[in-house]
Image: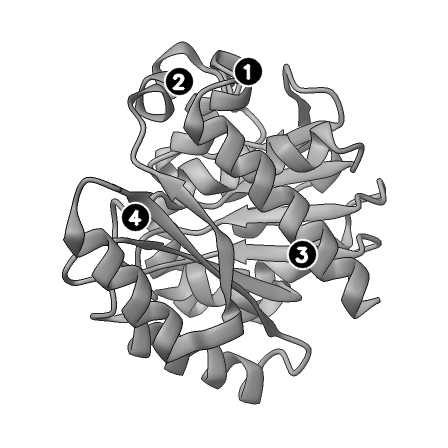
Amino acid sequence: MSPSKRIIAVANQKGGVGKTTTSVNLATALAACGRSVLLIDFDPQGNASTGLGINDRAHNSYSLIADGSGSDEAIQKTQVPRLDIIPTVVDLSAAEVELSDMPDREFRLRGAISRISTPYDYIIIDCPPSLGMLTVNALAAATSVLVPLQCEFYALEGLSQLMRTIDAVKAGLNGALSMQGIVLTMFDSRNKLSAMVANDVRDHFGELVYNTVVPRNVRVSEAPSFGQPVLIYDLKCPGSQAYAALAAELLRQEARAA
């Protein structure tokens, strides 16, 4: 397995829930807390790579799983100290089909991570918005799953399917997989529906839901177009403060479990 302590898959098959935003900014906040972090962009859309200003993608997550090329060569430094990234390219979308004919198809990403020579404190995998073979690879490689959940009417719809997939992967492919937690995103304090959804999620999942809630914040939406995490783009905005708080809460969670 990987020399890293924790491998967190950030997953939700529903798009537009803040999955990539959470991956990038949680990774940035953990790095700011002094942890060494590797972010693996495993979403063919490549938004995590774009959001960190990465243009050179000759070595990428697709080549890692498609031909088993060297993992260390794919790792790039980012503008954030202690945060590295393995970027992706749109070719990764073809892997959903190509993996079906590959040996150990569910474990290609796990194998790639095991070839990384640098011991990171955290590896964060930004999963695609689907429950296909790429997400199964991420779950088979991870030690835990973090689920971003948008505070909207259909928030809980599909979450049960994700939970069943996590249970199936744990039963058949990765017995060490656990739930890291659920983080509520895009919370609008002016909207009663946001509060209702947040209460419903907490009623259903209890302590699995983080206390930190990420608000809907225009600065969070602007930051990727400048190739920056929001914590660099505007450290003092509510979105940045929320992701800093989420990282602190996750580290306290890890300390209690140690």
Along the polypeptide, which appears first: circle 2 or circle 1?
A: 2
Numbered mark located on residue 17 in the image: 4
CB-based contact (under 8 Å), mark 1 and mark 3:
no
Q: Amino acid at mark 2?
A: Ala
Circle 2 SS class? helix
**Left or right, residue 219 beside residue 251:** left
User: Which is in the foreground here, disc 1 or disc 3?
Assistant: 1
Residue visible at 59% across and 60% down in the picture: 108
- Using the rendered image of the protein, determine whether residue 63 is visible from the camera's viewpoint: no
* Residue 193 x, y percent position in the rendering: 16, 55
Q: Amino acid at mark 4?
A: Val
Q: CA distance from mark 2 to mark 4?
A: 16 Å
Q: Which residue is mark 2?
A: 223
User: Which is in the foreground here, disc 2 or disc 3?
Assistant: 2
Q: Which residue is mark 3?
A: 7
Circle 3 SS class? strand
Mark 2 neighbour density, 10 Å: few (under 14) some (14–19) many (20 or more): some
Q: Which residue is mark 1?
A: 232
Circle 4 SS class? loop
